[in-house]
Image (cartoon, grey):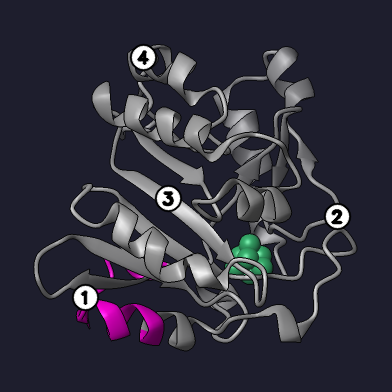
Amino acid sequence: MQTATGEPVEIALTTNGVILARKAQSLKDAGLKRVTVSLDGLSDATFRRMSGSDVAVATVLEGIAAAQAVGLGPLKVNMVVKRGVNEHEIVPMADHFRHSGIVLRFIEFMDVGTSNGWRMDDVVPAREILDRIAGRFPIEQLDPNYTGEVAERWRYVDGAGEVGVIASVTHTFCNECTRVRLSTDGKLYTCLFAGEGLDLRMPLRQSEGDRVLTNLIADCWGKRH
Ligand code: SF4
């Protein structure tokens, strides 16, 4: 897949992994490359408290294994850390994904509007997460892959792989953010917290053409504040 100017388009998927075991091969065949799976703990009880779903952790792990088996990658696992709920899973999760080739990233618990009852007391700062990992497995910092990368990269000194932290609360990075998100109903959002998105479905369905769509997206991006 290419852009209108001939550059490769990289398609990435972030998923809860629930049906990934069934869909991994077809996603790979469709050209998907990067996959990030959300997994907030290794025990079903913790996972249930964090996700609010009854899905078994084993189901998500099977999805991750299937994605690896069909060659989807780079693979990442995102773990949101909430004080008193799953912080005890930080080191077990790190241990589980060492030597796996999968980059585990710990994300500070973020305020996402009115839906999650966020309090600062619920946040386990990225520094504390790193200290806990380093207390068990020595780590050292790596350079970012690119300017504006939101995750701080670290590697295990013993060569067991890479781990990351996303300090979305204690070290905000909005001024460097270059992300847009396209929802399943075709709306383009320039921020996770945007209340409204730009409708691209209608112009797409009306076959307005790449130029019109490009201008719409550029205009929307230019109005970010
Ligand atoms: S601009 Fe929005 S999406 Fe980007 S880092 Fe800030 S809060 Fe997150």
Residue wearing tag 2: 195
Numbered mark located on residue 25 in the image: 4
Q: Earlier in the sequence, mark 1 or mark 4?
A: 4
121 lies left or right of 83: right
Q: Residue furthest right?
A: 114
> Is residue 36 placed above or below 222 in the rendered structure?
above
Give the x, y percent position of residue 83: 65, 77
Q: Amino acid at mark 2?
A: Gly
Q: Earlier in the sequence, mark 4 or mark 2?
A: 4
> Is residue 27 placed above or below 78 in the rendered structure?
above
Q: Earlier in the sequence, mark 3 or mark 4?
A: 4
The residue at the point 49 percent across, 65 percent down is 89
Which region shows up in magenta? Answer: 131-149
Tell me the element at label 2.
loop
Q: Earlier in the sequence, mark 2 or mark 1?
A: 1
Q: Residues within 10 Å of mark 4 (few under 14, many from 20)?
A: some
Give the x, y percent position of residue 204: 69, 20
Tell me the element at label 4.
helix
Q: Amino acid at mark 1?
A: Leu
Which label lies toward us, 1 or 4? 4
The residue at the point 45 percent across, 88 percent down is 127
Q: Amino acid at mark 3?
A: Val
158 lies left or right of 165: left
Numbered mark located on residue 82 in the image: none
**Residue 97, can we see it?**
yes
Mark 1 and mark 3 in contact (Cβ < 8 Å)? no
Split into quadrants, the picture shows ligand 1 in the one at bottom right
Q: Residues within 10 Å of mark 3 (few under 14, many from 20)?
A: many
